[in-house]
Amino acid sequence: MRRAALGMGFAVVLVSASQGLAAEPVDTARSVIGQQIEAFLNDDAAKAYSFASPQIKGLFPSEALFFEMVKRGYRPVYRPGNYAYGRSKVDGTTVVQEVLISGPDGKDWTALYSLTLQPDGSYKINGVQMLQQAPGPEI
């Protein structure tokens, strides 16, 4: 597994389908990550940005800047071929969710989303670390 140096991640607010707060952080994380990926696939910058944590919005103070950062630095998340949820870990007020992604170029990636509990009871992603998977042996 090779680490890709892509800098800061993007953010997601965690809400249930009914816009309430979820009782189970992992289920909530997976639901909202999927919602944000869907927003990227639909080129819906406003919706994708609406999931940003205050820390990420401080770094990218407009929808346009945020969306451009994701397009340039997180192409596999912006345009995934397929994705699936991997392992997750809850540690106090933090959820780390692994997302296995097939990028638009056919390369496989792991995105590690870090979500933290906010004062209003929602979860938001403070960053995403991208790891490129090493190619397997040819058969």
Image: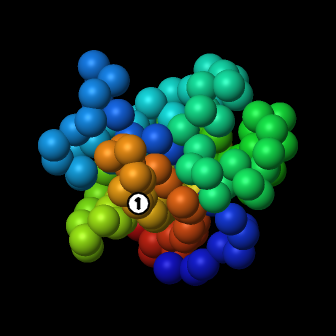
Instruction: Pick whichever, 74 or 56, lies toward us.
Output: 56
Amino acid of disc 1: Thr
The reply, left or right, for residue 114 in relation to residue 92 is: right
The single residue placed furthest to the left in the displayed view is 23
The reply, left or right, for residue 27 in relation to residue 45 is: left
Q: Quadrant of the C terminus?
A: bottom left
How is the rendered protein coloured? rainbow
Q: Is residue 74 visible?
A: no
Image location (x, y in percent) of residue 58: 73, 54
Instruction: Pick whichever, 103 or 7, lies toward us.
Output: 7
The reply, left or right, for residue 97 in relation to residue 72 is: left
Q: Is residue 127 visible?
A: yes
The single residue placed furthest to the front in the displayed view is 119
Q: Residue at x 46, y 41 (%)?
A: 13
Dividing the picture into quarters, in which one does residue 48 lie? top right
The reply, left or right, for residue 129 in relation to residue 21 is: right
Q: Which residue is mark 1?
A: 116
Instruction: Pick whichever, 138 or 33, lies toward us.
Output: 33
Image location (x, y in percent) of residue 103: 59, 48
Q: Residue at x 22, y 44 (%)?
A: 27
Image location (x, y in percent) of residue 3: 60, 78
User: How many residues crowd around disc 1 within 10 Å: few (fewer than 14), some, or many (20 or more)?
Assistant: many
Image position of 99 with respect to 89: above or below: above
Instruction: Pick whichever, 42 or 122, lies toward us.
Output: 122
Report how many numbered discs are placed on residues in the image. 1
Q: Residue at x 71, y 75 (%)?
A: 5
User: Is disc 1 placed on a helix, strand or loop?
Assistant: strand
Image location (x, y in percent) of residue 10: 62, 52
Image position of 134 with respect to 73: above or below: below
Q: Residue at x 66, y 73 (%)?
A: 4
Dividing the picture into quarters, in which one does residue 33 lie? top left
